[in-house]
Amino acid sequence: MESLVEATSGAVGALVSTTILYPLDTCKTKYQAENRAHNHQKYRKISDVLWEAISTGRVLSLYQGLGTKNLQSFISQFIYFYGYSFFKRLYLKKSGYKSIGTKANLIVAAAAGACTVIVTQPLDTASSKMQTSDFGKSKGLWKTLSENTWREAFDGLGISLLLTANPSIQYTVFDQLKQRLLKEKMSKNRDDVSSRAALSAFSAFVLGAVSKCIATCLTYPAIRCKVMIQTAESDEDEEDKAQPDSRKTIPGALRAIWKKEGILGFFKGLQAQILKTVLSSALLLMIKEKITKTTWVLLIALKRFMFITKDQVEELLN
């Protein structure tokens, strides 16, 4: 029951946050996917994507692929929160511990993340292709998937699995920053025996945001490569067309970025990625906390209704 509540509230939270931030996500993805030399770039900054949509009267096209993205977000968050809660309870049951340690928590989170990526990768690839297509020319989910093989639907799976390390990096950085801050507090209050050092809500929020930014910066080259691998056919020049699979591998994507954009190309769109990631995480957790209690009430009411209905059916049969 607990796993189901966590999964449902997390999935609904992801649905709302994805919808609110989707135009930013579309601009970011189109900007990340472009891989051209500096003098041939269509988008010199991320705001150019937004102005293109406005100038061509295609503002609503910023939402192209929203249905697919929402479906992916709902399923991925449901699987992640359900899997995390399930693996956590399984670990505590098998180990006999009352609480889960840091290392075990990271392993459980990575396992839940890996399961999520494997199941939702085709939807992730399809949504990236739909976002990066020309404004007003996006195809539906089924047509996008049917035009490619199942192998192509899983483009970027390896690098997506690699990116499940992002939360581990975030948690490690958060823990290190937390320990340093608490040591400073303890040194200032060492004369006061009764005082106990603890992070305030604001300090925890700031450290959480900083640790997420650091984790995003460290893994961003992989994030950029994943987008390029998934959208390889949507932004090809003459040289790329001669080697159609050159950008569908991690080494090929890395080589293409280095050759055309240099070292700074690995961090193209980083600011938008950080903004979107931090806002998305904040919205997701806020909405999830708000609807968890409501989800509990609805599921309990549904369970009681089903129990009463079952008893009524048995009485009629007897």
Image (cartoon, helix red, strand yellow):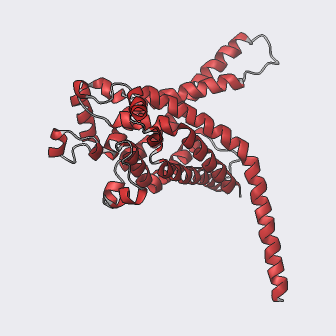
Q: Nearer the viewer, residue 83 or 78?
A: 78
Q: Is residue 315 above or below residue 181?
A: below
Q: Quadrant of residue 210?
A: top right
Residue pictured at 71% horizontal, 26% vertical: 201
Q: Quadrant of residue 301?
A: bottom right
Q: Is residue 1 left or right of residue 224?
A: right
Q: Nearer the viewer, residue 197 or 249?
A: 249
Residue pictured at 21% horizontal, 30% vertical: 259
Q: Is residue 151 above or below residue 310?
A: above
Residue 30 point in image, percent of width and height: 37, 37
Is any part of residue 213 visible from this angle? Answer: yes
Is any part of residue 199 visible from this angle? Answer: no
Q: Is residue 97 above or below residue 184?
A: below
Residue 222 point in image, percent of width and height: 37, 37
Residue 57 point in image, percent of width and height: 42, 37
Residue 164 point in image, percent of width and height: 47, 43
Q: Quadrant of the N terminus?
A: bottom right
Q: Quadrant of the C terminus?
A: bottom right
Q: Is residue 144 above or below residue 183?
A: below
Q: Is residue 304 left or right of residue 121?
A: right
